[in-house]
């Protein structure tokens, strides 16, 4: 099984439209694009999506079986692709946190999508994965996911400005092989709807993860890191990073 990232940036992506900062300019020169944070598990007979915020995700996975979608929350940069994916010829089950409004008219006109609300710390089995939902603190009701596969454990924590105490206590009692966490901001910003890289790194330290990675980076955070030659304990994901289990 592989965990592949389609993107690891914030909602603006990199390069940002018409931004002339050093990072956006360099990405254009090199022909690099980092899309909003989105990932998927690649299985033998299909894929399980972690969010679907990329608009053309239905084209990316055309001819592929989407076995399920694990939605973290209903912000546009994490579910925009569902507007087209709901017209799939396949029936697709989308698991999501409680949200009365959802996004746009997805609940009203779900078409091929079947929405299944899940609660905090609910366990479910999808294919060969055992998944536990982890409540996060964000501006919308949001879940992270603790995933067990064979003898490996993976934690996926985006978007958040903190973890609930119950979530931290739950994860501290687990051995975590790989952890991926929101670190949108740099150290100049200590409050908002996301973590900065120092706050995210402390959480990874507290959880004693074996392999920790930062994600949901903004162009301004990346520019600050490079201009100040900052050495981080945990690295940011690069566009289209992949991990094999």
Image (cartoon, rainbow, N blue to C red):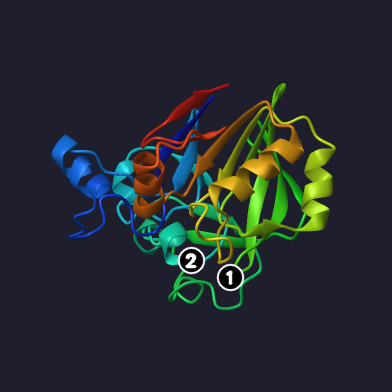
Which residue is more in the foreground, 21 or 75? 21
The image's mark for residue 75 is 2
Q: Earlier in the sequence, mark 1 or mark 2?
A: 2
> Circle 1 sits on which residue?
139
Whole-percent x, y for residue 235 in the image:
50, 33
Label 1 with label 2: CB-CB less than 8 Å = yes
Residue 223 image point, x, y percent: 34, 47
Residue sitting at x 62%, y 62%: 142
Residue at x 50%, y 57% (from the top left corner): 188
Of 69 and 51, which appears nearest the observer?
Answer: 51
The quadrant in which residue 190 appears is bottom right
Q: Is residue 8 visible?
A: yes
- The picture places residue 154, in percent across and down from the top left corner, at 65, 34
Q: Is 210 placed left or right of 225 in the picture?
A: right
Camera-nearest label, 1 or 2? 1
Query: What is the quadrant of residue 60 in the picture?
Result: top left
Q: Secondary structure beneath disc 1?
A: loop
Q: Position of residue 242 (x, y in %)?
A: 45, 28
Q: CA distance from mark 1 to mark 2?
A: 9 Å
Where 149 sits versus 54, above or below?
A: above
Where is the C terminus found, in terms of image quarters? top right
Quadrant where the N terminus lies? top right
Q: Is residue 8 above or below residue 52?
A: above
Q: Is residue 66 above or below residue 143?
A: above
């Amino acid at each position: 099984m592989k965990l592949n990232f389609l993107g690891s940036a914030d909602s603006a992506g990199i390069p940002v439209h018409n931004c002339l900062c050093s990072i956006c300019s360099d990405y254009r020169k090199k022909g690099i694009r980092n899309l909003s944070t989105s990932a998927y598990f690649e299985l033998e007979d299909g894929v399980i999506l972690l969010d679907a915020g990329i608009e053309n995700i239905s084209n990316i996975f055309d001819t592929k079986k989407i076995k399920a979608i694990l939605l973290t929350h209903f912000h546009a940069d994490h579910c925009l692709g569902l507007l087209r994916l709901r017209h799939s010829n396949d029936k697709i089950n989308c698991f999501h946190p409680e949200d009365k409004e959802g996004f746009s008219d997805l609940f009203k006109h779900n078409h091929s999508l079947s929405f299944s609300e899940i609660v905090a710390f609910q366990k479910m089995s999808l294919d060969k994965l055992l998944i536990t939902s982890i409540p996060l603190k964000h501006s919308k009701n949001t879940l992270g996911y603790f995933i067990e596969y064979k003898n490996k454990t993976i934690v996926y924590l985006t978007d958040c400005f903190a973890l609930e105490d119950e979530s931290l206590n739950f994860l501290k009692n687990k051995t975590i092989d790989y952890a991926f966490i929101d670190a949108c901001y740099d150290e100049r910003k200590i409050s908002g709807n996301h973590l900065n890289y120092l706050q995210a790194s402390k959480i990874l330290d507290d959880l004693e993860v074996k392999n920790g990675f930062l994600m949901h980076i903004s162009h301004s955070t990346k520019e600050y890191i490079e201009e100040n030659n900052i050495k981080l304990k945990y690295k940011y994901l690069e566009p289209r990073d992949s991990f094999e289990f």
